[in-house]
Image (spheres, rainbow, N blue to C red):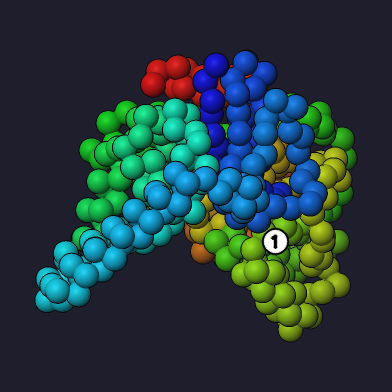
Amino acid sequence: MKHIVFVIGNYKNGGVARRSTNIANQLAKAGYDCTILVTGEMSETVFFEVHENVKIEELKKYQISNQTNERFKSEAKAERKIRLLKKIQYLIPFFSNISERISTKVKFLRNGKKLLPYVLLHKDSIYIPFGSFLLTSVISALNNKNAKIIYAEINAPEIDFPKKKAAKAEYLSVLSKINCAVFQTEDEKSFFKGFIKNSCVIHNPISDKLPEPYTGKRRKTVVNYCRIAEQKNLKLLIDAFMVFKKSNPDYTLEIYGNTVVEEEKNELKRLIDYTKSVNAQDYVFFLKPRADVHEIVKDCAMFVSSSDFEGLSNSMLEAMAIGLPCVCTDCLGGGAREMIKDGENGLLVPMNNIDLLVDAMHRMANDIDLSLKCTQNATLIRKELSLEQISKKWIKVVESI
């Protein structure tokens, strides 16, 4: 039985945790031994189910309970390598490209050290790191061991891709060591054309627990549910809604916000303070995340995403699946463009264009035929992105390596 290790950051109510859990659940049902290795923080409560054969392993606790001699020897070896690289860097201060590449290598090694307690006892597993940071950590920790690696992209790659030439070269050397890469969109895949030989596109799966598509009368509410991250550009949504409300006075805006890290908590506070500063607090509401959010929002007038970049937005996919008319920015990563056919199953607008965003919201609110057509066509993705269909593609990748 193949052991598959999904390596993620925080296990909270975010897209990566949901995506990895959905895939792990399906692979476990197919007979694979699956572990989700959490390198960051764990939430006491998550809003998705975990299959009984999927193990959630918190790295911090694993480090404490696995104090092996092999681990200490490996950590000491990694530390010696880091010191050697720093010494070389000190001796060649005028060769900036080499120095920058050494700095990048040292960073990768330090991050990889944290994974050593787990990797040393699971050398023959298939590792699926989610995101470039964890990819470099896994590669450094494995150090040419027998494990296989499937890289799972989680974002618009141009955001995280190194800008400096030397750092880029070091990162590309990491990419050369993976067995396969799984991208969420064609845009993501094309970005790495020429860098990664074996890759494919597998969209995010849609949970089979979502409510059935809603077709009744809609309440006059614009909704978004997401992580409260800067990349979501929620200030643009608030500004656009205030303009939209001038000609649609009966509408309110509801934002169900999930905060995973401290910066997101700060972002939420900034947005709430901004809403008060423009006297919009009586019709713009920030609400806590909830497990039944899809049931609560399914009869809203529309779902609006104002993001600057995404991997492939889970909230957008879920909104389409439950029949919410969708208005989304054509953000970096290409997920909205890949899923939404403008005027057919939603409306697509350029990023950071408040006038066109307001216009699209106005059309969706006041053109009943357009709203109904988008609802009917959007729900077709339920079959295309079902857990069953997506898991078959992942199994094919796993078996191919």
Task: Name the residue nearer the viewer: 235 or 51.
Answer: 51
x, y percentage for residue 109? Answer: 36, 56
Q: Residue at x 76, y 38 (%)?
A: 48
Task: Name the residue nearer the viewer: 382 or 38.
Answer: 38
* The image quarter in which residue 320 lies: top right
Residue 361 visible in the picture: no
Split into 4 quadrants, where in the image is the C terminus?
A: top left
Split into 4 quadrants, where in the image is the N terminus?
A: top right
In the rendered structure, the answer to whether residue 340 lies left or right of residue 276 reads left
Residue 328 position (above or below residue 95):
above
Q: Residue at x 62, y 16 (%)?
A: 31
The amino acid type, in three-letter code, at marker 1 is: Thr
In the rendered structure, the answer to whether residue 128 lies left or right of residue 27 reads left
Task: Specify the farthest residue to the bottom.
Answer: 277
x, y percentage for residue 349? Answer: 53, 52
In the rendered structure, the answer to whether residue 120 lies left or right of residue 82 reads right
In the rendered structure, the answer to whether residue 22 lies left or right of residue 399 reads right
Q: Residue at x 56, y 49 (%)?
A: 67
x, y percentage for residue 171? Answer: 29, 51
Q: Residue at x 72, y 57 (%)?
A: 258
Task: Specify the farthest residue to the front.
Answer: 69
Residue 294 position (above or below residue 279):
above
x, y percentage for residue 296? Answer: 86, 45
How many marks on residues?
1
Residue 36 visible in the picture: yes
Q: What SS does tag 1 mark?
A: loop
Q: Which residue is mark 1?
A: 259
* The image quarter in which residue 161 lies: bottom left
